Amino acid sequence: MGERCNNKAINFIIDGTLLAPTDYGKSSSDVWIKFEKATGVSISGGSLDCRGTALWACKHSSSSCPTGATTLGFYNSRNMVISGLSSINSQKFHIVMDGCQNVKLQGITISAPGNSPNTDDIHIESSSGITVLNSRITTGDDCVSIGPGSSNL
């Protein structure tokens, strides 16, 4: 059984680019980097490359492809700051916030080509107090999608 961290101020500083595995078909998770029930997390700098190009090609040529992974997911978390982060070529959604409160995204860059399927940049669901400031968002699908149960965005 996993242990819980009780620290209320966890800072992740990414200096460089984190690359997802190249074989999209072997992923056992639908989220590449996942935070659940986190409080006070901050992520700054760096780049996340989920290497979605091969999966998109599969989806354009066949109907028997995996769905792919969301690059960065936050679930039932609160009081977070994501700043100066880049997400490119997500297989699926770039950033998901589900059941989150008081989240600030500032100075982020999210991009995927226009032909990338289902690569919503920021998906917000059942969340409140989400703020996006001074960011550059371009993709082949929704730049910001808001699902049910969200308010005060």
Image (cartoon, rainbow, N blue to C red):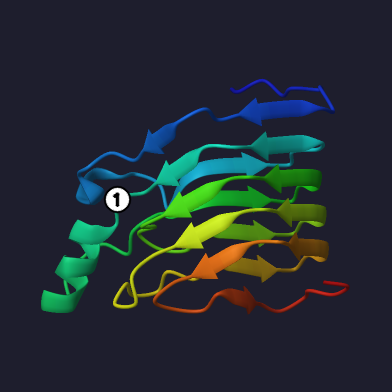
Estimate the x, y position of residue 66 in percent, counting from the top left: 26, 62
Residue located farthest toward the left when viewing the structure as drawn: 61
Residue 58 position (above or below residue 1):
below
Q: Residue at x 44, y 78 (%)?
A: 141
Residue 80 placement: quadrant = top right
Label 1 residue SS:
loop
Within 10 Å of disc 1 (Cα), the crowding (few <14, some 14-19, many 20+) is some
Residue 30 seen in render: yes
Image quarter of the N terminus: top right
Q: Nearer the viewer, residue 34 or 134?
A: 134
Estimate the x, y position of residue 108 in percent, counting from the top left: 61, 54
Q: Nearer the viewer, residue 89 or 45?
A: 45
Q: Left or right: where does residue 34 sit relative to residue 88? A: right
Image quarter of the C terminus: bottom right
Q: Residue at x 55, y 30 (%)?
A: 14
Residue 51 position (above or below residue 47):
below
